Image (cartoon, rainbow, N blue to C red):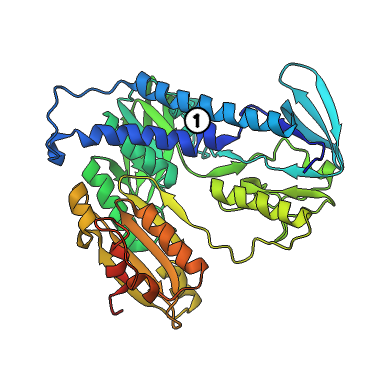
Amino acid sequence: MGQKTIVVERSMIGGACPNVACLPSKNVVYSAKAVSLVDPKRGLGVVTGTISVDMPAVIRRKRQMVEGLVKMHLDNFVASGVEIVMGEARFIAPKTVDVKLNAGGTRRISGERVFLDVGTRATIPDAPGLAAAAPMTHVELLNLERVPAHLVIIGGGYVGLEFAQAMRRFGSQVTVIQHGTHLLPEEDPDMSEALLELMKDEGVEVLLDAEVLNVAGRSGTGVALQVRVGATQRALDASDILVAAGRTPNTDTLDAAKGNVRLDSQGYIQVNERLQTSAPDVWAMGECAGSPKFTHVGEDDCFIVLNNLAGGNRTTRDRLIPYCLFTDPELAHVGLHETEAKARGVSYRLLKLPMAAILRTHTLSQKRGFCKALIGQDDRILGFTAFGAEASEMMGIVQTAMIGGMPHAALRDAIFTHPTVAEGLKSLFAISG
């Protein structure tokens, strides 16, 4: 837009997603899938010798991808004329920050506008001895050039489940400790149960309604955990710990009050529906502003701010936000969950189809799972969830129909290529719910 712009970055050009989150984790997950595809139990007819995992090579492939993505971001910065300042900024006054430079020294920067996009980091639960045990977060695990003998994962959410399956396929013994009574508790009970069955079939031990009471030792050399599971206690010995139990906003070093930027009780930046903070000409975007914790939402936040700066009137209200859990098979969702619809008193019809009814899954030998849709009284789609092979691709089609306000019959009557997973939508929406 031709305006003088400075980006202050603590360490990772491009942020978390290309460096230590979405893309590198899916890179590693795919390597784990390659291991599973040559498993003779899959019956795919691939005959090999002894299978082994070269973990340094797995990480090397990931690093090559990350290096390419970082270069892409650097090239974009150069092309746009943005100045990059490597260091950590904190407010000293409204719209003015001091930057502690990575190379040494400080630099003071003031601007007409300030945009806060400082993200979040993995939360370390307050369990006795856990922090002293130096557990891994996703950042350290994605650089681990060995296969842990026994990996304990604290948390049964997106990060925990993706890594649980991948590390198990690489050869680790894996135990997941989930504080709640269900995996992915925000999902409907049938989806949570399906994920639990997947983890058990993969050989992952899952402890539900569990809590870490004490940790001794050091992750990487050996740890001993005392865990409450329901009403009982048990001892658990492992080689490594991965913490995947939520996120903490990176606002604790921002000195936000000096910039007249208000935080909520959890440390997230308070914003309105146009992502404006309490301070004039200061905006916050992405996870630090309490937006749903997905890269695509942070990106949309940016487009909302840019649109409004150009005279538009976009807001965060009523956004249709999709997401996907990249286990194998995938879980993908958009719109209302059943539990949400019931809690809100929304009237709906439920359509549900096993993935085995979609012929493409037979060609892949991946018949696990099901898909379901909620249909409103006006025959429009209120929500869609799929757990199965290529679920994310099905979800993208349904999301497009929802954005267009199409009745579900439009997908029922569409002609999809055979054999694809997409054609399963014809069967799903032909069900009389």
Give the quadrant of the C terminus.
bottom left
**In the rendered view, would you say 333 is above or below 9?**
below
**In the rendered view, would you say 3 is above or below 269?**
above
Q: How many marks?
A: 1
Left or right of residue 135, residue 388 in this image: left
Residue drawn at (58%, 26%) of the image: 71
Residue drawn at (25%, 51%) of the image: 197
Q: Residues within 10 Å of mark 1 (few under 14, many from 20)?
A: some
Residue drawn at (16%, 40%) of the image: 42
Q: Nearer the viewer, residue 252 or 337?
A: 337
Q: Quadrant of residue 311?
A: bottom right
- Residue located farthest toward the bottom when viewing the structure as drawn: 377
Label 1, on which residue?
Answer: 139
- Residue located farthest toward the top when viewing the structure as drawn: 104
Q: Quadrant of residue 248?
A: top right
Q: Nearer the viewer, residue 272 or 410?
A: 410
SS at mark 1 in the image: helix
Q: Position of residue 390 (x, y in %)?
A: 33, 51
Q: Nearer the viewer, residue 3 or 324?
A: 3
Q: Position of residue 198 (x, y in %)?
A: 26, 48
Is residue 432 at least partly visible in the picture?
yes
Residue drawn at (65%, 60%) of the image: 316
Q: Position of residue 268 (x, y in %)?
A: 67, 49
**In the rendered view, would you say 336 is above or below 21?**
below
Left or right of residue 175, residue 89 in this image: right
Q: Position of residue 406 (x, y in %)?
A: 46, 73
Residue type indicated by callout 1:
Val
Is residue 270 at least partly visible in the picture?
no
Give the quadrant of the N terminus.
top right
